[in-house]
Every structure is written in structure tokens, then in C-alpha cells.
Image: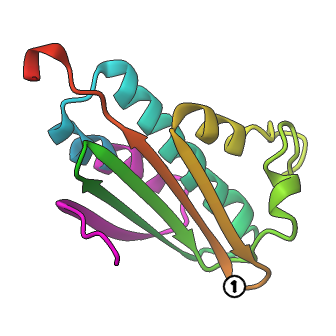
């Protein structure tokens, strides 16, 4: 049985670099209802930036495509963020998740998935060549003593 979120947002936008900031701001504003610390919020924003930037740079290298962002809140202060594209896909997901591996040229660090994984509690990547990629990240926001 699929668990329904308590709340969610869903937005779509073109794969233009200017929209990376929109994605960060939208998720940060949405996650604020969980009363995260500034560190937690910073981690979430960084992970979203990496996921969206990957879609912009790698999924659509020669064109502008569509990116879908969904953020959900589940019981237990669990935030789930999904970034989806319909671009070229990732030929080898395991290789792409290795630190320093990139297909984006010398100016790319190859640390996107590593950063997402280190800042979130879990990271799942599904991809099919020519069909696109779905990145799902989860982070549980700790209940602070003052709110218990």
C-alpha cells in the first residue's frame, strides 16, 4: 500500500540554469513548515541544487527540456524530494555515482551525486537511456527539544 503524503508541492520548469535558484527556494519554503535548523535547510537546498543542476547540464546538453520537482512531507517529519527529467538518461548509474566521475567536461567536478548522498538520508537514482532520470532524496528533520 502506498503511503500518502501529509502535504506536497509539484512544479515543472524548463532546464534553464536560472531555474536552479527557483527550485532551491521552492523546496526551502516548503520544508520550512518542518522547522528545520539552518544547517538542515542548507543541506536540503544544496542537494536540490545538485539534482537540478545535473538535470540541466547532463540530461539536456544540446536543448532545453522539462524538469519536474516534487517535494512531499510524510509522517515522522520525513521530507522526500524527487527531481525528474525526460532527457538523455544515464548510461551507467553506478559509474555516475562515483566521486569525481563526470560527463560534463573539465569544468564539472563530478561530485553531484556524492554531495546529494552525504547531505540527505537516502538517495535513489533511476535512469533509462533516451528516457530520462528520476532522483529521489529523503531527509528526516529532527524534532527539536523546544517543539517536543
Q: Residue at x 52, y 59 (%)?
A: 136
Residue 93 picture quarter: bottom right
**Mark 1 closeness class: few <14, some 14–19, many ≥20 residues within 10 Å:** few
Question: Is 12 part of what is drawn in magenta?
Answer: yes
Q: Residue at x 34, y 48 (%)?
A: 79
Q: Residue furthest top?
A: 145
Q: Is residue 9 visible?
A: yes
Q: Is residue 103 visible?
A: no
Which residue carries the number 1 mark?
A: 131
Q: Residue at x 80, y 41 (%)?
A: 110
**Figure check: 126 above or below 23:** below
Region in magenta? 1-26
Q: Is residue 26 left or right of residue 108?
A: left
**Figure check: 79 above or below 141:** below
The percent position of residue 133, horizontal first and vertical second, equals 65, 71
Q: Name the quarter where the N terminus is drawn.
A: bottom left
Nearer to me, 128 or 17: 128
**Figure check: 140 above or below 61:** above
Q: Name the quarter where the C terminus is drawn.
A: top left
Nearer to me, 49 or 122: 122
The percent position of residue 43, horizontal first and vertical second, equals 46, 30
Nearer to me, 37 or 141: 141
The percent position of residue 86, horizontal first and vertical second, equals 61, 80
Amino acid at each position: 500500500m502506498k503511503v500518502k503524503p501529509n502535504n506536497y508541492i509539484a512544479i515543472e520548469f524548463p532546464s534553464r540554469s536560472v531555474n536552479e535558484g527557483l527550485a532551491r527556494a521552492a523546496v526551502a519554503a516548503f520544508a520550512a513548515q518542518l522547522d528545520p535548523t539552518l544547517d538542515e535547510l542548507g543541506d536540503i537546498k544544496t542537494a536540490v541544487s545538485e539534482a537540478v543542476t545535473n538535470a540541466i547540464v547532463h540530461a539536456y546538453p544540446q536543448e532545453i527540456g522539462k524538469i519536474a520537482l516534487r517535494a512531499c512531507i510524510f509522517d515522522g517529519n520525513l521530507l522526500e524530494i524527487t527531481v525528474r527529467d525526460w532527457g538523455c538518461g544515464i548510461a551507467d548509474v553506478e559509474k555516475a555515482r562515483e566521486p569525481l566521475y563526470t560527463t560534463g567536461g573539465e569544468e564539472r567536478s563530478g561530485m553531484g551525486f556524492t554531495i546529494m548522498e552525504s547531505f540527505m538520508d537516502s538517495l535513489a537514482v533511476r535512469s533509462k537511456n533516451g528516457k530520462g532520470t528520476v532522483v529521489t532524496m529523503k531527509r528526516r528533520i529532527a524534532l527539536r527539544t523546544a517543539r517536543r
